[in-house]
């Protein structure tokens, strides 16, 4: 059970990091282009 929880936490962290980096790329593209 603990492994599943740690996998979910790792997935959520990865999703948040990807979300913010993706948002930053979109913002730079908007201001640049």
Image: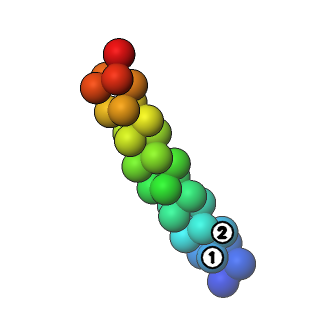
Q: Disc 1 to disc 2, how far (Cα)? A: 4 Å
Image quadrant holding the N terminus, namely bottom right
**Which residue is depicted at the point 38% across and 39% down?**
23
Task: Tally the numbered discs.
Answer: 2
Confirm whether residue 19 shows in the render.
Answer: no
Label 1 crowd bin: few (<14), some (14–19), many (20+), radius 10 Å: few
Residue 27 location (% of width, % of height): 32, 33
Which residue is farthest right? 3
Q: Is residue 18 above or below residue 9?
A: above
Residue 26 location (% of width, % of height): 39, 30
Q: Quadrant of residue 6?
A: bottom right
Q: Are marks 1 and 2 in contact (CB under 8 Å)?
A: yes
Residue 31 location (% of width, % of height): 28, 26
- The disc label shown at residue 6, or none: 1
Confirm whether residue 24 shows in the render.
Answer: yes
Q: Is residue 1 above or below residue 25?
A: below
* 16 relative position to 14: left or right: left
- The disc label shown at residue 28, or none: none
Image quadrant holding the C terminus, namely top left
């Amino acid at each position: 059970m603990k492994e599943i929880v740690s996998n979910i936490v790792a997935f959520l962290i990865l999703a948040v990091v990807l979300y913010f980096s993706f948002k930053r790329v979109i913002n730079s593209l908007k201001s640049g282009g």
